[in-house]
Image: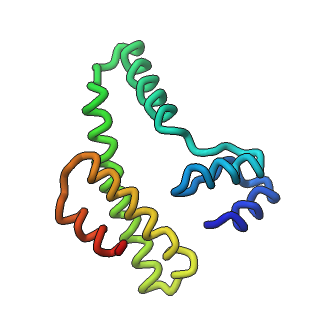
Amino acid sequence: MGAPMAKNLHRAGLLQSVWNRTRVKAAELAAELGCQAPPSLAELRGHRLFFLEERRLLGLGAIDPDDFATEFRLMTIQRGLKATGTFSYQTAVSGRGAVYEPFIQPTLEIVLQAAEWLDRFPALRRMIEERAA
């Protein structure tokens, strides 16, 4: 959505955190606006371990941390592709490109990262890489 819109949302009291593909840019804007920056990878790992420990303490079945990470990334791919389809439809068919088109490429990049981490879906990865070129 961009820094100007984030600033408008902040002035209206509607912004709690910011995100950018470049973590440094997100951190700079978060510091400027006094809101939360996206978590680091270490913080995300900590959240994952907290979740797994809470499950154990509640007496729920154990989940292997690697299996959890794999399932999370598979879900990331599925939801990212679904969102890309929605954004593309809204852009091409509904004439809402100004709103939805900016989200297509970043969402595909997230899908690509998850597919690369899993080392799966080579045809999907090629298609996304070709589109990005």
The C terminus lies in quadrant: bottom left
At horizontal 73% and vertical 46% (from top left) the residue drawn is 31
Residue 57 position, x and y percent, is 41, 13
Whether residue 86 is situated above or below residue 59 in the rendered picture: below
Query: Image quadrant of residue 124?
Result: bottom left
Q: How many marks overall?
A: 0
Whether residue 18 is situated above or below residue 43 in the rendered picture: below
Q: How is the image coloured?
A: rainbow
At horizontal 32% and vertical 58% (from top left) the residue drawn is 112
Query: Image quadrant of residue 72?
Result: top left
Residue 6 position, x and y percent, is 70, 61
71 to the left or right of 34: left
At horizontal 62% and vertical 55% (from top left) the residue drawn is 25
Whether residue 27 is situated above or below residue 68 in the rendered picture: below
* Most foreground residue, 68 or 109: 109
At horizontal 37% and vertical 59% (from top left) the residue drawn is 80
Residue 132 position, x and y percent, is 36, 72
103 to the left or right of 35: left
Residue 105 position, x and y percent, is 43, 69
* Most foreground residue, 106 or 8: 106
The N terminus lies in quadrant: bottom right
